[in-house]
Amino acid sequence: MTERITQLGFDGILKRHVSVTFDGGALTSDTGAIPLSVLDRQLGLSQQLTDCLVDTRDSARVRHSLKDLVCQRMLQICLGYEDANDANALRIDPALKVALGRAPTSGLDLASQPTLSRFENAVTRKQLFRLSRSIERVYFDHRPAPDKQIIIDIDASDDPTHGQQAFAFYHGYYRHHMFHPLFIFDGATGDLMASILRPGNVHAANGVLKPVKRLVRKIRRRWPWVKIIIRADAGFAVPRLYRFCEHRGIGYILGLGTNEVLKRLHAPLLDQAIKLYKQSDGKIRLIGETRYSAKSWKRNRRVLMKAEVMPQGTNRRFVVTNLEGEPESLYDFYVKRGDAENRIKDLKNALKADRLSCSRFEANCFRLLLHSAAYVLMHHLRLKLHGTELERAQFDTIRIKLLKVGARVSESCRRVWIRAASSYPYQEIWLLLHRRLTSPAPS
């Protein structure tokens, strides 16, 4: 904006003239940065990320530590400011300054866009390797010990590109230029276990074995008694993943693409479903199973088959698995992998993890990891909200209701005051969150 706004007038609302000015002083719309920063310190998240970086700057000219840059970027993403450009205005925001340990009005301003952009572009491949491990460490450090099993949900997503980003390619399935990131979640808790940025033209299963092997090794070292189950859609139904699971004693249940052989095996089940549909008033779903071996397989495997008939037509699905159990309960278990898609929606819609606009591929990899760290922070915030109306809310809902809280900020020699509106409707949830964040951790 080139013109300074002094006063805006509105008539016809009240009998008196209504004026709006932008000179209210130390105000913030992001009071939620405070509990987020407390939670970050408890998780050690920004510190873990910082420990993976090497500061090559001239120490005599450094005004912002690497930890402050990591924390500032991560908090801004959580609060809905996904672009580094937003920092030019937010660098004086009093709540963000308090969250980073600075005095709200008299302290040093936060980093601006050029500083953050240089920071993102300075990362090396070796540092990226260590950064990806830090997300895993936070998961293993804070995941409660499982009773019987851990479900590893794997999914990929398209990340459209619109510039000259390195390794952005056209993908025939999605029909646009893109990156093709890989995400791995804990299917029971929703924790993010790994996120990997890949070139836009790779297959969905490309490079999946390496992080899966590493996670399996760490899970068995930490919790040797648990059964591990891998769950994913048809894009990951590749023989190398089957063989790995069968060799290591890991359960798997994966979507399977349709072909003519499977259609023939499925035909009797579909005929039965059609007959039942003609005799009923609603949708019919039947789940059966068969043994099947593709040409590239050295053995046959158990395949679940779904035949569904509804007013819109018929629907067939196939799932390959080595798990024991009734076909219907196994298929319902497979369908729950859709939760991974909801978690990716939180990453992409609420946290804008697809805003990867740097030219260097390494810088975009770093950006994805920063957005992934923001996911970890928001996920643990949601865990703190159990028993409230927000315990299952999407991240953007939590942000609007709990984090985007306006307040006036003032300071004295002994205290910083953050005064929110008396009419704020979620004060009880804030009180509960404060108790859970400040109560001593159980020994």
Image (spheres, rainbow, N blue to C red):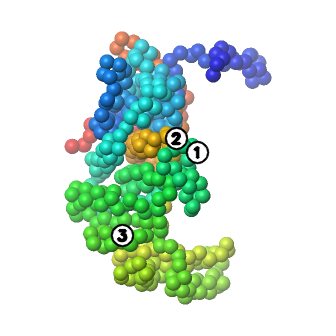
The picture quadrant where one finds residue 239 is bottom left
Report the residue at 37% width, 28% height from top: 68
Label 1, on which residue? Answer: 162
Decide: few, some or many residues near mark 1? Use Cα within 10 Å; few <14, some 14-19, many ≥20: few
* Location of mark 2 (residue): 357
Against 299, residue 96 (above or below) is above
Amino acid, disc 2: Ser
x 53%, y 53%: residue: 169
Residue type at numbered disc 3: Arg
- Judged from this view, the residue extending furthest toward the top is 413
CA gap, disc 1 and disc 3: 34 Å
Q: Position of residue 269 (x, y in %)?
A: 54, 85
Instruction: Say which amino acid is labelled 1.
Output: His
For the residue pair 48 and 44, the one nearer the viewer reads as 48
Q: Is residue 329 visible to us here?
A: no
Q: Earlier in the sequence, mark 2 or mark 3?
A: 3
Would you identify the image quadrant in which residue 122 lies? top left
Q: Quadrant of the C terminus?
A: top left
Q: Which mark is residue 240?
A: 3
Asked if labels 1 and 2 touch by Cβ distance under 8 angstroms, the answer is: yes
Does 345 sit left or right of 298 as displayed?
A: right
